[in-house]
Image (tube, helix red, strand yellow):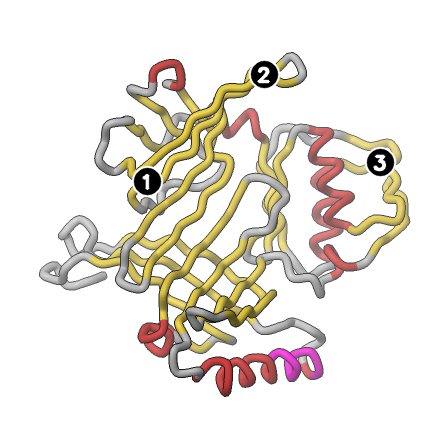
Amino acid sequence: MSNINTARSTVVETTFQGVNVTDSLRPFLKSCSYSESRSEESDDFQILLHDRDDLWVKSWLIDVINAVERSKRTQKNTGFMINGALVQKNWHSDGKDRMLSFGQFQLDEVVAKAPPREITIKGTALPYGIGVQQANKTRKFESVRLNNIAERISKESGMSVIFESAINPLYTRIDQNNISDIVFLQQLCNSAGVSLKVTNNIIVMIDNAAFVAKPAVFDINRTDKAVLGYSVRSASTDDMHEMTVDIKHEGNPVLLSCLTVNLHGWGRWSGKYVIDSTQHSVSGNGGYVTDIKLERT
């Protein structure tokens, strides 16, 4: 909760290894972005910092790298963990805050570049060091359903699973042949028509058709001032006609993949669409934009 008299603002709360570093990052922060999709691509969280005084290159990045190495030695490669959450404070002038939790990420990459002197810190929701991603396996599963396989894989990797699908095929026998668990599970989901994604150490499996059938969470009018830019596309491929729309929208934490929106005033592109992917970006001065990619249902 915020004070009802507080000016509305958007901030990204960030922790490194459980320590809140939001205030420490603020003087250097150029932008933060959270990307997520309904596909097998892992969610990611990126932080862009200016480094005009070389503080990050000469000192602080070394501390981060050393922390990662200590983690590998003492915590069985759990990695350097980053958490992020977007908070819109007093957004409707009623003292209530809106929040979008990005979840937990393992440090994946650090890039320093110049000019200008900048540091990019990137975290991934699917760490490369965990078994579900890393090791190729050969084994068989007998008399099991899709959710049973997902539960076994998640348990072996120290993860949890959310299974929200009426589609749950039974396999008399199915073989995993020299591929990683996540690739194997993705193949099964593709065949069954189920979406698979990994976020916040959770394997999420969703019935595509069921989610598309749910009511739209938001209406978007083409002439609305909240629409900051867009592109539309119509294409025919393999006897299928695809209609897609990309929209740059005033920041909105409600807009997330797998949910649906209604487009009004878009001519032949009007109608109901499923959100395929989003990127939520917040600038250092608090400007918030949501980029969404839509597919016609």
Q: Which residue is mark 2?
A: 236
Towards the viewer: 181 or 147: 181
Quadrant showing the N terminus:
bottom left
Q: Which residue is mark 3?
A: 143
Q: Is residue 160 left or right of residue 85?
A: right
Q: Is residue 148 left or right of residue 230?
A: right
Question: CB of mark 3 within 8 Å of CB of mark 1?
Answer: no
Tell me the SS state at disc 1. Answer: strand
> Which residue does the image show at 36% across and 42% down from the upper left?
254
Q: Residue furthest bottom?
A: 59
- The x and y percentages for residue 148 are 74, 43
Nearest to viewer (mark 2 / mark 1): 2
> Which residue does the image show at 33% across and 59% down from the upper left?
283
Nearest to viewer (mark 3 / mark 2): 2
Q: Main secondary structure of the magenta part?
A: helix
Above/below status of 91 relative to 61: above
Question: CB of mark 3 within 8 Å of CB of mark 2?
Answer: no
Q: Which residue is mark 1?
A: 249
